[in-house]
Amino acid sequence: MPLTLLQTLAAPFRRPLSFHRRSGSKSTVTAPRSPDAAKQVGTPSSATNALIGDAGGIPVVDFSGFLDGSAKQQTSTAILDSFKRFGFVYLKNYGIPTEKVDEMFDWSKKFFAQPMQVKMLAPHPGVPHINRGYVAPGVEKFTQSNDSEEVAQLRNKEPDLIENFSCGHDESVLGKNIWLPEGVLPGFNEACQDFYWKCYEVEISILRTVAVGLGIPEDHLAKSHSGRDQSLRLMHYPAVPAKKLVEGEMSRIGAHSDFSSITLLFQDDVGGLEVEHPDHPGEFMSVPPVLGAVMVNAGDFLQRWSNDQIRSALHRVRAPPGMTDGMTPDRYSIPYFCSTDFDLTVDCLPGTYSDSNPKKYEPITVSTHGVATSLPRLSVTRTRR
Ligand SMILES: O=C(O)CCC(=O)C(=O)O
Ligand SMILES: [Fe+2]
């Protein structure tokens, strides 16, 4: 990729916006807890003053030391270590005030509370890889499988119980935004756009920490993420009988890994998110929401980019922990999927390969990677329109 093109793409777009693994799962386990999170996750002592605890075994890191420059290296090491071991990390003091996140959740609730005919004024186009517009409950089913027979069988099973609304940048190959018509839910479209750019700032800071952790130039990853090909998705899981989720008769979101660089995952206080245990494939750890923290996970593309040093972990949403009877509460979450510009070719990151540990992957663009790995998976979703 010529440098000039890289530089052009590195200039952020501005408002207005417009490996892998088996499916299947076993039991849920809780990672052993200890009062000393640093010890528990085997984190080097240099990272301890950025670590402020753990939740369900996954480190909680105070991001302010990176943002104000007082603990850049420690914060970066803590985040990178957690990405390498778990593929996930919680961040506190990451730069978006809690009230802003709460406001976005309020908008999400208002949107999903609209009658179906209103939500369908911004319909998803029905093309699997396009993250735009509203997808009604009963349309999607998530899987990690690329096996056509397994996928065909899944299509005949109950879909995931989820509705969602996605938006992004109008100039993305993911397509132009599909908004509600003007005058319907005034303020909603603007709130989504505003939140998108707030998330973008956090994304860039996190990508900088990963680079610092890896000991490469701080802007190495950030400069490949112009902000054009990200997606903000509002998710709503309606209330369902807990028993059906526990017995596997219904599912909220099936086990999957995310596809691109990193995901910021904002969740309400309902719980139910589970992450595959790093030492016990097929077993899942229950990871609770942490007040004021955003969960961040690495995606398949970052795993590949880091020559498999960073883990893109399977995760899923089940019944809230301990709940086996009665109706579950509704669950709302807001993932923000971060991607390198889709047309940019990236090679394994410097320092992640050597003569004794050669590159496992050829240079690739996100689009090629996506077509090879994600489209078969996506094809099982959005099949029931
Ligand atoms: O709702 C959640 O907490 C998980 C969402 C998720 O994993 C996804 O949309 O990729
Ligand atoms: Fe996900």
Image (tube, grey):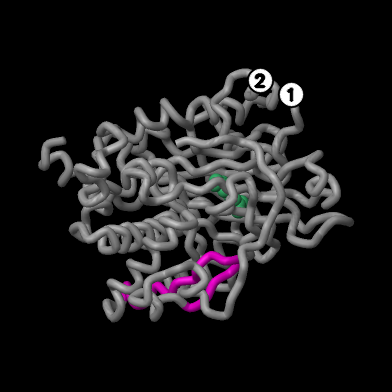
At numbered mark 2, what does the secondary structure look like: helix, strand or loop? helix
- Image mark for residue 257: none
Direction right: furthest residue: 326
**Nearer to us in this view, 134 or 247:** 247
**Nearer to us in this view, 338 or 78:** 78
Name the quadrant containing residue 355.
Answer: top left
Disc 1 target residue: 156
**Nearer to us in this view, 304 or 219:** 304
Task: Please name the residue shown 74% across and 23% down the image.
Answer: 156
- Image mark for residue 152: 2
Is residue 72 rendered to the left or right of residue 146? left
Q: Amino acid at mark 1?
A: Asn
Q: Is residue 22 above or below residue 283?
A: above
Name the quadrant containing residue 203.
Answer: bottom left
At numbered mark 1, what does the secondary structure look like: helix, strand or loop? loop
CB atoms at circles 2 and 1 under 8 Å apart?
yes
Task: Please name the residue shown 66% across and 62% down the image.
Answer: 30
Residue 183 is at least partly visible in this image? no
State yes or no: Cβ of the residue under disc 2 lies below 8 Å from any atom of ligand 1.
no
Q: Quadrant of the C terminus?
A: top right
The span shown in magenta is 52-67
